[in-house]
């Protein structure tokens, strides 16, 4: 049994906690939060943009610490699950690795490339695993894409378009702070940057046009350029000021023998699946594959199952590896550089 300590009990800490309840081979043995109510299991103040609301949790005898150092000193803990603000990821992850713990850290890996490099090096030096919670590949539509491309069933990948757009996140006061959160590209587009990196490898350059908000990009359209000039990949991501559409994401992915479509939004507070995952084939067919339950927590269950597998076997995850998350962050920063300078930027 892998004993897990969750550091940071906000919305993502709660989602991780709920996901562990559905996972075999791991249990939450400790939590760390400075909030005394949360240490006692009163999580009713937690709110997020999906999944269940916060409630009173039965912590099942898990230790409750006020400080991260106390959790790191607990000899029972094998894996530290970091759900802290992004600016704290690097110091917390490095401390946990040096304490002899495996680390599962929420995305983004960090806010700066320097911190991301330090985290990857610390994992290499410690001999422990650094796993980054880039959960998108575990959502059923994206899992289908990844497996379809890898299998080569419809021929090679020709490219595609990805989008991830939100309304102004009023509940995140530091969202546009370049040092604390990193803004829409680092906190939001990093999902698609990671997925593009998984599917296509690292591009040779990016060209982005968009709007700045202080030091960060508010919205950008990007062309990602690869060594294979026939691989055409674009992405749109950022914030719009109209609050009626809180969230939208989707893709149109082109293969030699098929096109994969998907489009989901939250409009007026209600989910709108305008295009269920659909496979258009060269024979004129339009097939909608059967997917899972639609419960978003299930994607986190699948992600944590991958974490457990990786820790149990001692092998890096092909989906959650720290170097992949570092590359995704690199793409976000290169796009910011392109928007700021108005020119193509080499990766």
Image: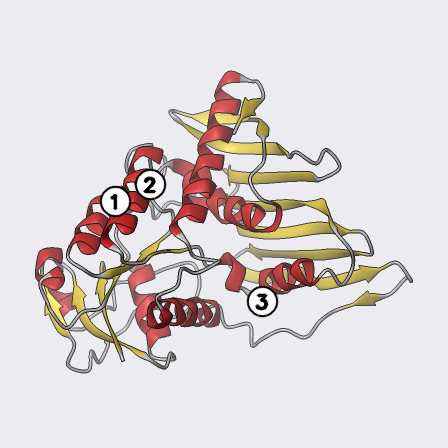
- Mark 1 or mark 3, which is nearer to you? 1
On the question of residue 231 being in view, the answer is: yes
Mark 1 and 3 residues: CB-CB less than 8 Å, in contact?
A: no
* In-image side of 22 versus 252 (left or right): left
Which residue position is annotated with label 3?
140
Res. 174 in view: no
User: How far apart are the alpha carbons under marks 3 and 2?
Assistant: 28 Å
Q: Which label is found at residue 90?
A: 1
Q: What residue is drawn where x is 52% and y is 44%?
A: 193
The foreground one among 96 and 339 is 96
Do the numbered discs 2 and 1 sit on residues whose CB atoms are within 8 Å? Answer: yes
Q: Quadrant of residue 202?
A: top right
Residue at image mark 2: 116
Category of crowding for the residue at label 3, using alpha-carbon neighbours closer than 10 angstroms: few (below 14), some (14–19), many (at least 20): many
- Tag on residue 259? none
Residue 291 location, quadrant:
bottom right
Percent from the top left, x then y, of residue 207?
A: 60, 26
Please state if 76 lies on the left or on the right of 3 as rendered.
left
Of the numbered discs 3 and 2, the one sitting upstream in the chain is 2
Counting residues from the start of the chain, the first of labels 2 and 1 encountered is: 1
Q: Secondary structure at mark 1?
A: helix
Q: Is residue 275 left or right of residue 116?
A: right
Q: Position of residue 114 (x, y in %)?
A: 31, 33
């Amino acid at each position: 049994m892998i004993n897990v300590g969750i550091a940071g009990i906000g919305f993502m800490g709660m989602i991780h906690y709920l996901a562990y309840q559905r996972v075999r081979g791991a249990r939450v043995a400790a939590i760390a939060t400075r909030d005394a109510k949360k240490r006692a299991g009163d999580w009713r103040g937690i709110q997020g943009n999906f999944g269940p609301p916060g409630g009173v949790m039965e912590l099942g005898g898990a230790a409750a610490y006020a400080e991260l150092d106390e959790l790191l000193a607990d000899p029972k803990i094998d894996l530290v699950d970091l759900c802290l603000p992004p600016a704290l990821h690097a110091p917390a992850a490095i401390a946990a690795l040096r304490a002899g713990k495996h680390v599962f850290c929420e995305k983004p890996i960090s806010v700066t490339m320097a911190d991301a490099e330090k985290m990857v090096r610390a994992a290499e030096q410690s001999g422990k695993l650094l796993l980054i919670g880039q959960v998108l590949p575990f959502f059923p539509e994206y899992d289908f894409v990844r497996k379809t491309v890898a299998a080569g069933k419809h021929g090679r990948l020709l490219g595609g378009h990805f989008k991830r757009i939100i309304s102004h996140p009023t509940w995140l006061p530091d969202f546009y702070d370049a040092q604390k959160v990193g803004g829409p590209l680092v906190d939001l587009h990093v999902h698609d940057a990671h997925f593009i990196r998984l599917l296509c490898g690292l591009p040779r350059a990016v060209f982005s046009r968009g709007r700045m908000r202080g030091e960060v990009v508010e919205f950008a359209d990007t062309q990602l350029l690869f060594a294979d000039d026939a691989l055409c990949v674009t992405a749109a991501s950022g914030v719009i000021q109209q609050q009626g559409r809180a969230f939208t994401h989707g893709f149109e992915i082109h293969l030699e023998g098929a096109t994969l479509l998907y489009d989901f939004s939250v409009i007026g507070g209600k989910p709108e699946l305008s295009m269920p995952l659909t496979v258009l084939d060269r024979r004129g067919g339009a097939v909608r594959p059967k997917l899972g339950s639609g419960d978003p927590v299930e994607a986190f269950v699948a992600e944590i199952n991958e974490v457990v597998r990786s820790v149990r076997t001692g092998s890096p995850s092909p989906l959650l590896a720290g170097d992949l998350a570092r590359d995704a962050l690199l793409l976000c920063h290169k796009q910011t550089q392109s928007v700021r300078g108005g020119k193509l930027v080499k990766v």
